[in-house]
Amino acid sequence: MKMSLLKKTNIPQILFSILVLTSCGKDKKTQTDTAAEVEDTLPRMKPLANETKISQAYINSVTGRINHFYNKNWPNNTMNGSFLVAKNGQIIFERYNGFANKNEGTKITAETPVQIASVSKVLTATAVLKLVNAGKIDLDQKVNTILKTFPYPDCTVRMLLSHRSGMRNYAYFTDRDKSVWNRHNQLTNKDILDILATKDIGLESKTGTRFSYCNTNYAMLALIIQKITGLSYKEAMSEMIFKPLGMTHTYVFDNDKDRKKIVPSYKGNGVEIGFDYLDNVYGDKNVFSTARDLLKFDRARNAPGFLKPELLKQVYTGYSNERKGTKNYGLGIRMINWETGQNYYFHNGWWHGNTSSYIPLMKEHVTIIALSNKMTRNTYAVRKLAPIFGDYPFNFKDEE
């Protein structure tokens, strides 16, 4: 019986099947290994650990002045937002007040993510810089070698980061001419690139010749992040920055999924501001976060391994000073460079009724953050706190 079964069996066929199965298993393993290898090469932020604990005496010496500023700037707790001051990552002073959602009666707390507007640019720039640091792109690489349809051949990654591309703001070339864009449709980052590639959108100035702050630059940087990582901008930011730093209340706004659950913004008179056709563009805005999460992000930007020293130096070099002055812009960060040698770094934001201010006093290891979802310029006044901590020669007319 065994012999007859053996005779009927095609031995070469069995051997071939075993070979194929073994080969498939190897292929599957190779694919898995390759996927893991690709994932492992994604550069990620690392928290800054073991900062020196500050004394209660130090906290007592500065809280009175911070509290005085807070009461003067937002009398009777009128801020409608989040305000935090920390040193060495340790919170010295924080306040949360006002409505997250007036209709629902929900209040802003330490865990309420609000739209941080153009402070999002600091985070986008950070992701790009991590990719540069990892050797995945070069600062002086031409953008059209990454985004193949990008129509301005002289523009580099560095020029996008420092607002020297010469491009026009997408909000201005999409808002009137229906042959360029129909405002009844939500605009996306890819749409902006397609319009630039096909609609003969002229430059505002010759590429590389002057500074002009422009949201289009950071919409393109978001597409570069996607292209290089193979992830959506939302996923890339989560994997590279938010998850590794434990920023559990931070996310990139998704117009399709988040529209009904986000914290809305309000005019100064308390009227809610609705959405418009520009609300689906990210990179320049559309990160929602909290003051505490942004503190984690700030401290990680101060970690020794954040960037190689030569690259870090370029981040805090000014690129916008065509004519001699104090105001300047680095790679994703604003700055004031006084002739006396002091340097002050910051980034502000405004979108709809949301205003934001992020101030890293790097020499003093102090972080100042203010976020509001109700339109006010008072958010930007937090710069007045800088002289409490270091030699920042601001000329505040109303300084006491």
Image: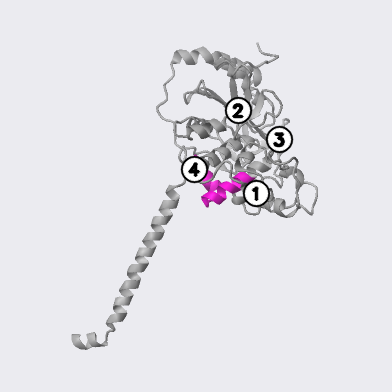
Q: Which residue is mark 3?
A: 210
Quarter in which the C terminus is drawn: top right
Is the Cβ of the residue at disc 1 closer than 8 Å to that at disc 4? Answer: no
Residue 241: % across, % down? 50, 40
Mark 2 secondary-structure assignment:
strand
Q: How is the image coloured?
A: one colour
Rendered position, 70 above or below 297: above
Q: Earlier in the sequence, mark 4 or mark 2?
A: 4
Q: Earlier in the sequence, mark 3 or mark 2?
A: 3
Q: Which residue is mark 4?
A: 240
Q: Earlier in the sequence, mark 1 or mark 2?
A: 1
Q: Is residue 132 left or right of residue 8?
A: right
Is the Cβ of the residue at disc 4 closer than 8 Å to that at disc 2? Answer: no
Q: Main secondary structure of the magenta part?
A: helix
Question: Distance from label 3 to label 4 (Cα)?
Answer: 31 Å
Residue 274 magenta: no
- 82 or 85: which is nearer to us? 85
Residue 181: % across, % down? 75, 52
User: Which residue is the extreme one toward the top?
Assistant: 400
Q: Which residue is mark 1?
A: 189
Question: Distance from label 1 to label 2 (Cα)?
Answer: 26 Å
Mark 1 secondary-structure assignment:
helix
Q: Amino acid at mark 1?
A: Asn
Give the number of the disc on residue 346.
2
Residue 394: % across, % down? 65, 17
Q: Is residue 259 visible?
A: no
Q: Earlier in the sequence, mark 1 or mark 3?
A: 1
Q: Amino acid at mark 4?
A: Met
Give the number of the disc on residue 111.
none
Question: Distance from label 4 to label 2 (Cα)?
Answer: 22 Å
